[in-house]
Image (cartoon, rainbow, N blue to C red):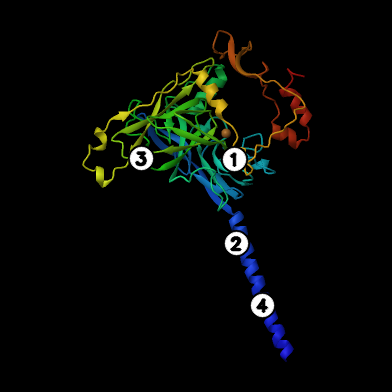
Amino acid sequence: MGASILSLQAFFRLFLFSFITFCCLSSDFALASITRHYKFEIKLQNLTRLCHTKSIVTVNGQFPGPRIVAREGDNLLIKVVNHVHNNISIHWHGIRQLRSGWADGPAYVTQCPIQTGNSYVYNYTIVGQRGTLWWHAHISWLRSTVYGPLIILPKRGVPYPFIKPYKEVPIIFGEWWNADPEAVINQALQTGGGPNVSDAYTINGLPGPLYNCSAKDTFKLKVQAGKTYLLRLINAALNDELFFSIANHTLKVVETDAVYVKPFETNTILIAPGQTTNVLLKTKPNFPNATFFMTARPYATGLGTFDNSTLAGILEYETTTLHSTLLPMKKLPLHKPILPALNDTSFATKFASKLRSLNTPQFPANVPQKVDKHLFFTIGLGTNPCSHNNQTCQGPTNGTMFAGSINNVSFTMPNTALLQSHFLANPMGFIPLIFQSVL
Ligand SMILES: [Cu+2]
């Protein structure tokens, strides 16, 4: 009897121990990673910009699209349902997709596009990345309206390698066409000329007051004095590198493309299409009695025309009761930043050379130390002669059409889709078609 009571106590102790261990472990697991579910309904939405109303393809009717927020290590399950007439696929720009290439999103490359009335669940885990990325449609030019931020926070309990910001604000640049962007790219592909340039750049979907009929569509960043803000900058413009600056303020670059960098300060940043950059904005210690433009416009040196307009948003300090007797916000002086010239390559080169990996024990720069072979790539935009039977060819000069190239070799569109070639287990039937000029 005594022995059985003892063993009962031992059993309970063991049970309690196991239970506590299980709880601790499972909460550890919960902290380590979770699965996050999102639903993207691809649908049309009427939208007016620059006094032009049109129906655009969106996710959940939002422009820009919804924000995805996850932590490093999390699993994402995103169900995309296509309610529009266009085929669609969504790309998770910058996600490494380790062993989940089928969730990457480029239509006809890693998946067939999602057809009208169909859906697809993107399933992937974020491994070894944290910072700002973004998502966008990856078929034709639908990414002109189908895009949004993808924010990866560090694992729970892991701090940023920089001061904890008071607030975080995604800022996403885009391009706006009054025309239908699908018609614009289709025409360009047919004629071999450059696509018609956009009518405006946008900041969080808004062109700002420097465009006609646009003053009401102005992004305002309301801040408090004496705080640090983390601006998560994303360039979702289709074709243009952009300079960006906030008048009378300095930005500290701390991360690009979801990789921490050695912090450096600058008045202006340069951000390529597809690129992301996190910057810290330290606001003035006291209410400045002024408001400040934040502007962006392109850096361009290539052939062809480009949209050389300037977007503007406004940095506005919130007043406290202390300042309530001051001038109303509208009367405050408005400062404007001075951006580099449109073709300021010297600035671009200097800026790029400042980007250095953080390279700390926690975030090492693991790059190969030994190089087996050096390869030299020149990427350019040149021209090809129009084919004789192409009556619609209207490139930059008579009888030519634009052609992008690597080492002066252009891409030749294969006759068999990559997926089909893979399915037929005949990759070699595909590869020589692309690189026939090289082989
Ligand atoms: Cu992309």
Residue position for label 4: 13
Q: Residues within 10 Å of mark 3 (few under 14, many from 20)?
A: few
Whether ligand 1 has any atom under 8 Å from the Cβ at mark 1 is answered as: no
> Quick check: can you spot residue 154?
yes
Front position among marks 2 and 3: 3
Front position among marks 3 and 1: 3
Whether ligand 1 has any atom under 8 Å from the Cβ at mark 4 is answered as: no
Which of marks 3 and 4 precedes in the sequence?
Answer: 4
Question: Which is more toward the observer, 421 or 220?
Answer: 220
Residue at mark 1 to residue at mark 4: CA–CA distance: 55 Å
> Across the whole image, how many numbered discs are drawn on residues?
4
Name the quarter showing ligand 1: top right
Residue position for label 3: 285
Three-letter amino acid code at disc 1?
Ile
Residue at mark 3 to residue at mark 1: CA–CA distance: 51 Å
Q: Residue 114 carries which label?
A: 1
Residue position for label 2: 27
| Label 4 with label 3: CB-CB less than 8 Å | no
Which of marks 1 and 3 precedes in the sequence?
Answer: 1
Element on which disc 2 rests: helix
Three-letter amino acid code at disc 2?
Ser
Element on which disc 3 rests: loop
Is residue 17 positioned above or below 291 on the image?
A: below
Estimate the x, y position of residue 17 in percent, counting from the top left.
66, 72
Q: Which mark is residue 357?
A: none
Which of marks 1 and 2 precedes in the sequence?
Answer: 2
| Label 2 with label 3: CB-CB less than 8 Å | no
Q: How crowded is mark 2: few (under 14 residues within 10 Å), some or many (20 or more)?
A: few
Three-letter amino acid code at disc 4?
Arg
Is residue 340 positioned above or below 231 on the image?
A: above
Element on which disc 1 rests: loop
